[in-house]
Amino acid sequence: MNNRSDIPISMQSLSDNPEYTIDSGSRQLMNMGELWKYRELFYFFTWRDIKIKYKQTVLGFLWAIIQPVLMMAIFTLFFGHALNVPSQNIPYPVFVFSGLLLWNLYSTGLSSSANSMVSNSHIIKKIYFPRLIVPVSSVLVALFDFVMALCLFIVLLIYYQQAVDLSALWLWPTGILITLIATLGPGTWIAALNVKYRDFRYVIPFLIQVLFFLTPVIYPIGMLEHEILQYIVAISPMYAAIELFRIPIVNESPDLLLIGISAISSILFLIGGLFYFKKN
Amino acid sequence: MRPILEVKGLSKKYLIQHSNGGYLSLRERMINVLKFKRNITEDFWALHDISFDIYPGDSFGIIGRNGAGKSTLLKILSRITRPTQGRIRIGGRVASLLEVGTGFHPELTGRENIFFNGSLLGMKRVEIESKFDEIVDFSGIEKFLDTPLKHYSSGMQLRLAFSVAAFWIPRYLSLMKCWQ
């Protein structure tokens, strides 16, 4: 009680920072103002994870490119050549890479954000900051890899002299945006579930594997002969993203209803995910 | 004068699990639902109806035995967990130090760790940059700034952790956990 000498300093900091209260009630779904206040932490979390990811690797950032290229080569060999899977009148490597590009963003983003809360638990238990930063920034790390691979995709397009429609300028960003929404929804959801039940750590790889074959990544949706099957596939949020991304290349008008179903399902997942994340 | 920290009727309840070894697995929970069995839990009040005020300039210490609830109180004040009942009014930013060096990563260099740790504590990037030299001076590790933290001795790690914390504390209301 004798340490009153620094009152002016304390009073000064009082005026800088608005007062707040802590109680047992839950606040709104997303505290936008608070997220904005902590915007620099998004950057620092993402920056840290990218740094760590490629520390002590000889090839470094090149790994972001090598993986999709090898995948593309394997799929081209087995599905394109050996099984003759149709590819909507474009070279099969271009077709499969356009799908894999978004798919890798989705799968790495989903698995890293789902594990993010557990792997950062030592920080979460010690310091307060908006928890949403953790899963969101792990999706941003995946976005970084995606940009690397996208550069390669453009090289591939030039190599195959593939014509690209100008609508790519708005269809590609939309496709990427849907992918991010589709990643964040289940990502935040599973991240919260994973904290409670570690069972989900084992569910994620399996889930991604199943979704991979349920989503028209390596085959066109037209290959599915039953219409009902097409609608089921369209529930997968990634369908819309990949289809929108491919339109400028294949120059085929897609089934808008299917894309609509898929886009709505991705948004529903996002709302559900954010809600569950907040609750926990 | 208005108190800088006002705690009113604060309580925190935890549920203690008595079955299946303290963990609640998804399987157990689903089986319990099927059997119409409630999960066996016991209430445990870590804090019960605590009220106090702290005025600007006060130094306030909390002493108690193991399990008295000191850390629980600190965790609630630093917003890591929510109270079950009661409310707290805080005028100002809380600098809570449950542990120095939180978020230090062994693969990052000393420089990178200063930035990440500072940012976690709520410092702005400009703020860290302006204090960077002082932090480094104080820690005395400038020779090893670009060495990954995993090559540091534990003493060096601790010095770095304390230096970041020391340059961030004084401006705000600070909470600190001390132990022997």
Image (tube, coloured by chain):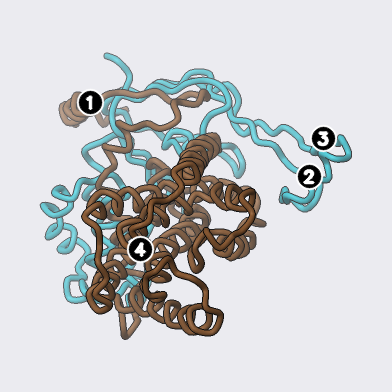
Chain colours: A brown, B cyan
Q: Are dots 3 and 2 in contact, CB under 8 Å?
A: no
Marks 3 and 1 sit apart, C-alpha to C-alpha, by 47 Å
For label 2, the residue is: B30
Specify the subunit that label 1 lies on.
Answer: A
Q: Nearest to the eye among marks 3 and 1: give it.
A: 3
Instruction: Provide the secondary structure element on which disc 2 rests.
Output: helix
Kindly check if marks 2 and 1 are in contact, taking CB atoms under 8 A apart as contact: no
The kind of secondary structure element at disc 3 is loop
Percent across and percent down for residue A88 are 42, 65
C-alpha gap between disc 2 and disc 1: 49 Å
> Residue under mark 3: which chain is it in?
B
Label 4: how many Cα within 10 Å (few below 14, some 14–19, many 20+) = some
User: What residue is disc 4 on?
Assistant: A49
Q: In the rendered structure, are the residues bearing label 4 and label 3 in contact, judged by CB atoms less than 8 Å apart? A: no
Quadrant location of the N terminus of chain B in the rendered image: top left
Which label sits in the foreground, 3 or 2?
Answer: 2
Q: Where A102 falls versus A260 (above or below)?
A: below
Label 2 Cα crowd, 10 Å radius (few <14 / some 14-19 / many 20+): few
Q: Which mark is residue A14?
A: 1
Q: Which residue is mark 3?
A: B38
Chain that bears disc 2? B
Q: Can you tell which quarter of the image residue A198 is in?
A: bottom right
- Amino acid at circle 3: Arg
Disc 4 + disc 1, Cβ < 8 Å: no
